[in-house]
Amino acid sequence: MKIKRSIGERTFDGINVIFMILLIIVTLYPLLYVAFASISSPSLLMQHRGILLVPLGFETGAYQAVFDNPMISRGYINTLFIVVVGTTVNIVMTSLGAYVLSRKDLYWKKVFMFLIVLTMFFGGGMIPTYLLVKQLHLTNTLWSLIIPNALSTYNMIIMRTSFMS
């Protein structure tokens, strides 16, 4: 059975469609511009005025410069290390803490939970975290990004609740 829609509903839907199309254009155009500019000829790109809808010429010099730079590949290796090791350490530490706190026979369970929840409300801040990293001699190492974030309090509480059920 087809429902008859009023003129107001159809107008509202039309305005929504137009708004969404404009939103898509505003979102995607900068990405397309960067993609087209990256493979365009630099001299043609500098002379171009207006909206760029197609690549101007074809050159891969920008990509060659990126791949020849050892700092770029080192950055990706560092990122991969931080993501893999940091996530693994965080999951292991959070799981260990959640499992211990889910045990019914744990002494001072309420005290531990109070102290853990307290850290959610009152974070140490940037300066104490830096001082901690400095005292642990982790300055200028990748571990300075992993160790301070090795435990997620919020996720530990959620995991603890899951272990208790």
Image (cartoon, grey):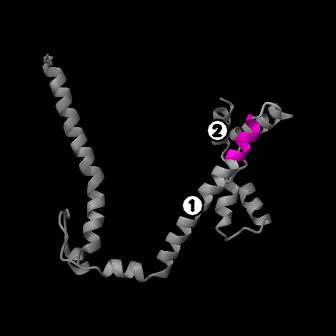
The residue identified by callout 1 is 84
Locate the C terminus by quadrant.
top right
Q: Is residue 96 magenta?
A: yes
The residue identified by callout 2 is 159
Pointer 2 or 1: first along the chain: 1
- At numbered mark 1, what does the secondary structure look like: helix, strand or loop? helix
Q: Is residue 90 magenta?
A: no
Kind of residue sitting beneath label 2: Met
Could you tell me if residue 119 is visible in this image?
no
Kind of residue sitting beneath label 1: Val
Could you tell me if residue 93 is visible in this image?
yes
In percent of width and height, residue 32 lies at 26, 61
Residue nearer the viewer, 23 or 164: 164
Q: Give the image quarter of residue 3.
A: top left
Q: Is the residue 71 above or below the residue 115 in the image?
A: below
Q: Give the image quarter of residue 115.
A: top right
In percent of width and height, residue 45 lies at 23, 74
Residue nearer the viewer, 104 or 78: 104
